[in-house]
Image (tube, rainbow, N blue to C red):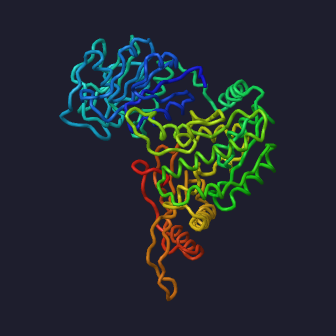
């Protein structure tokens, strides 16, 4: 989808790159992340109103360190370099970067030296967040020093005539006290963004784009019942009406009674054409004996599309398939980031077969989860539904660690249902980004009554987050954990131990597989 104004983020592998994107979008400005090897012609095609060079783990003088074409600085487009991005900008203009005698990690105090648009309204001696081992020792040609810290005499630089700016610290993190103001200054005082990228505008432009793409053809929608696919279905329905055919596939990997509840809700509340396909047997057959999580995802993705293609032939004129793919799915499944590697394959992205008879429509491929929820509210879906926790495309197959069988799925369904019901009862559900149970591929010794048991372990996972890119584990009370553990062990046959996952993302992912 083309956007009237775009900020281009060129990524050099920073752990904070997604945060830069979130901070920009919070200002109703659209942005895209691209790897550092993006070509100059691709940049021209994007026609960005501003460019941000991210930080990165390497030093600019390391062998094989990523670089960018010097032409980027000659396009007349404002550029903001952050940490590594600033140092890269400096060496492009004959500045010098060297290892720092005193490396800076954590908070520092920023002293403003000379005024510039980037620091308009920013108070002096504010806290900033540092994460670097190098610093600029010779000022690049035509640049002025705009800020310093105790250990970085050149902490901010600017060539205002060419709208080139650099920061040694990270304005995108919450620890930088005036970070939001600095980013706003770059967007609105330097790039002159309009800030009109809103849920309402996105919804209207998406409907127009979908109409133009589809024409008079029919479209299938993969309606899983999760937030993403449901909002996508309603959006496409608003665009093309009865040309849309929603297909709900019961993979056999759903939560307790989920398929029936999904069909009932959409039939009663929304005038959508829905086909219910029970494909649970074929999914479970193909997963038999499979323990590797990537193979699970590939099998599920390929089977999922196969089922859709088999359904598509029953409807004349079907050429498109709608999926609720999100931007984090794309980032984590491909090398969108500069020096990153694939973390896992999402069934909506990397799990698709190379040859597919249906063309994809992914209206949310550029959006984060909270942005999709905002679109859902714009489309008047109820908050109780919009606030549902994310659920992975491969379903419970990636929460049953090891081989997926009907018996193991049933154990997990019962444990997960107890966990989620207790979250609602304790009024905790809406305070948590995502919560679920995981069935581990280990058994432990226990005692029930006078008998020795050797049964399964269930792990509970609950995290707080804003977009799923980073997450922290939720601090439950002892009372809650004791209640849930007792209920699961008492009521779920085959479980004699419950553990709680206290890992954050990073270094862990939210899902276990």
Rendering quarter of residue 315: top right
Above or below, 300 against 291 in this view is: above
Query: Which image quarter holds the N terminus?
Result: top right
- Residue at x 74% of width, y 57% of height: 260
- Residue 172 in picture, x, y percent from top left: 43, 34
> What residue do we see at 35% from left, 18% from top?
158
Q: Residue 424: where, in percent of width, then height?
A: 63, 61
Residue lying farthest left? 101
Residue in front for this viewpoint, 93 or 492: 492
Is residue 199 positioned above or below 481 on the image? Answer: above
Residue 293 visible in the displayed image? yes
Of all residues, the one furthest to the bottom in this rendering is 450
Q: Is residue 373 left or right of residue 104?
A: right
Residue 422 visible within the image: no
Q: How many numbered marks have been drawn onto this rendered protein structure?
A: 0
Q: Residue at x 50, y 44 (%)?
A: 345
Q: Position of residue 382 (x, y in %)?
A: 72, 47
Query: In the image shown, does 60 or 223 lie closer to the viewer?
Result: 223
- Above or below residue 362? Residue 166 is above
Residue 416 occupies quadrant: bottom right
x then y, percent, for residue 52: 43, 25
Q: Nearer the viewer, residue 467 or 106?
A: 467
């Amino acid at each position: 989808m083309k956007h009237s104004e775009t900020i281009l983020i060129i990524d050099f592998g920073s752990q904070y790159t997604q945060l830069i994107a979130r901070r920009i979008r919070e200002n109703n400005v659209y942005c895209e992340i691209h790897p550092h090897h993006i070509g100059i012609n691709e940049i021209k095609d994007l026609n960005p109103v501003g460019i941000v060079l991210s930080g990165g783990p390497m030093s600019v003088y390391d062998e094989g360190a990523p670089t960018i074409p010097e032409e980027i600085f000659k396009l007349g487009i404002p550029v903001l370099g952050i940490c590594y991005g600033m140092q890269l900008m400096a060496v492009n203009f004959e500045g010098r970067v060297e290892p720092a005698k005193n490396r800076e990690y954590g908070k520092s105090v920023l002293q403003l030296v000379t005024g510039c648009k980037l620091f308009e309204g920013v108070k002096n001696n504010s806290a900033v967040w540092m994460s670097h081992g190098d610093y600029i020792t010779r000022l690049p040609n035509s640049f002025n020093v705009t800020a310093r810290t105790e250990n970085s005499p050149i902490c901010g630089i600017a060539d205002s005539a060419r709208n080139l700016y650099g920061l040694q610290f990270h304005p995108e993190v919450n620890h930088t006290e005036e970070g939001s103001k600095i980013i706003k200054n770059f967007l609105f005082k330097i790039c002159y963004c309009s800030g009109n990228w809103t849920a309402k505008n996105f919804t209207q432009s998406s409907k127009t784009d979908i109409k133009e793409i589809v024409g008079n053809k029919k479209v299938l929608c993969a309606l899983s019942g999760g937030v993403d696919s449901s909002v996508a279905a309603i959006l496409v329905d608003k665009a093309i009406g009865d040309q849309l055919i929603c297909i709900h596939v019961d993979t056999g990997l759903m939560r307790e009674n989920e398929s029936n509840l999904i069909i009932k809700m959409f039939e009663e509340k929304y005038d959508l054409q829905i086909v219910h396909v029970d494909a649970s047997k074929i999914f479970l057959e193909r997963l038999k004996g499979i323990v590797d999580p990537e193979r699970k995802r590939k099998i599920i993705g390929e089977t999922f599309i196969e089922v859709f293609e088999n359904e598509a032939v029953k409807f004349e004129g079907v050429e498109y398939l709608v999926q609720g793919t999100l931007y984090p799915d794309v980032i984590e499944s491909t090398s969108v980031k500069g020096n990153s590697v694939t973390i896992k394959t999402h069934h909506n992205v990397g799990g698709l077969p190379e040859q597919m008879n249906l063309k994809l429509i992914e209206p949310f491929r550029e959006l984060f989860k909270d942005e999709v929820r905002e679109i859902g509210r714009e489309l008047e879906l109820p908050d109780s539904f919009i606030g549902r926790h994310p659920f992975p495309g491969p379903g419970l197959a990636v929460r049953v660690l090891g081989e997926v069988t009907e018996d193991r799925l049933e154990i997990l369904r019962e444990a997960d249902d107890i966990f989620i019901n207790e979250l609602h009862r304790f009024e905790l559900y809406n305070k948590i980004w995502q919560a679920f149970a995981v069935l581990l591929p280990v058994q432990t010794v226990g005692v029930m009554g006078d008998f020795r048991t050797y049964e399964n372990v269930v792990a509970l996972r609950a995290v707080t987050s804003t977009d799923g890119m980073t997450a922290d584990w939720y601090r439950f009370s002892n009372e809650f954990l004791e209640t849930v553990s007792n209920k699961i062990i008492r009521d779920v046959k085959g479980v004699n131990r419950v553990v709680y996952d206290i890992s954050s993302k990073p270094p862990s992912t939210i899902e276990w597989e």
